[in-house]
Amino acid sequence: VPSADPGHLWVACGSAQREQEGAAALSRGSGVCKWFNIRMGFGFLSMSRRDGAPLQQPLDVFVHQSKLHMEGFRSLREGEAVEFTFKKSSKGLESVYVTGPNGAPCVGGERRPKRGQKARRSKVDRCYNCGGPGHHAKECQLPPQPKKCHCCQSVSHMVANCPAKAQQQQHSGSQGTTWRDEEEEQNQATLSEN
């Protein structure tokens, strides 16, 4: 849109000039993924060709997951062949757009679950009144049921006074002593000596 303001024209010309300089600063490269951290979302490419010419020594180019051309979860597999445009930044070479060979989408690495994380069991809603699945207590067809112990399901007591739970705790406690138990025994032995 033309403007009568000469300052506006200068700003528009300056931004166009910066875009041309930015496009001129981009180079093309190809190589393989050196490594990629799936959890952090970045890695490095090992560039073996720059603007079509082979390099004597491979160069490292930084890659962020946001620059990958692919659907879904974006990542790279170690050793995956890639083509990319890159620029020189204050930190080194940085990829701008990364594809697979001939502009195809990147293949990507496998998404693995976090270490130590087990597969989740599907949680079934259960009624607090009758214990049946698929409904809640307010929708239960049975009249209010007596409260039960969570440990042994007895209606005669609650979990705080459960003899079965107390017996389990005594049984597990007798198998191994804690440092407090040992310290208490030492204190009693010292008192009996005096």
Image (tube, rainbow, N blue to C red):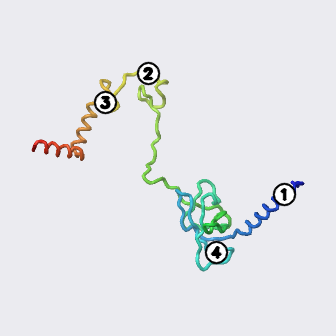
Residues at circles 1 and 3 in contact by the CB criterion of under 8 Å:
no
Residue 70, numbered circle = none
Place of residue 72 in the rendered image (x, y in percent of width and height, measured from the top left): 61, 53
Residue with the mark numbered 3: 160
Place of residue 42 in the rendered image (x, y in percent of width and height, measured from the top left): 57, 61
At horizontal 13% and vertical 42% (from top left) the residue drawn is 191
Residue 142, numbered circle = 2
The foreground one among 133 and 21 is 21
Place of residue 3 in the rendered image (x, y in percent of width and height, measured from the top left): 88, 54
> What is the distance, in whole Å, between disc 3 and disc 4 at their CAs?
72 Å
Question: Does dot 1 land on a helix, a strand or a loop?
Answer: helix
Left or right of residue 138, residue 185 in this image: left
Which tag is nearer the camera, tag 3 or tag 4?
Answer: 3
At horizontal 48% and vertical 28% (from top left) the residue drawn is 136
Residue with the mark numbered 1: 7
Question: Does dot 2 land on a helix, a strand or a loop?
Answer: loop
Which tag is nearer the camera, tag 1 or tag 2?
Answer: 1
Q: Is residue 58 above or below residue 115?
A: below
Residue with the mark numbered 4: 49
Place of residue 60 in the rendered image (x, y in percent of width and height, measured from the top left): 58, 70
Q: Earlier in the sequence, mark 3 or mark 2?
A: 2
Classed neighbour count for the residue bearing mark 1: other residues with Cα under 10 Å, few (<14), some (14–19), many (≥20): few
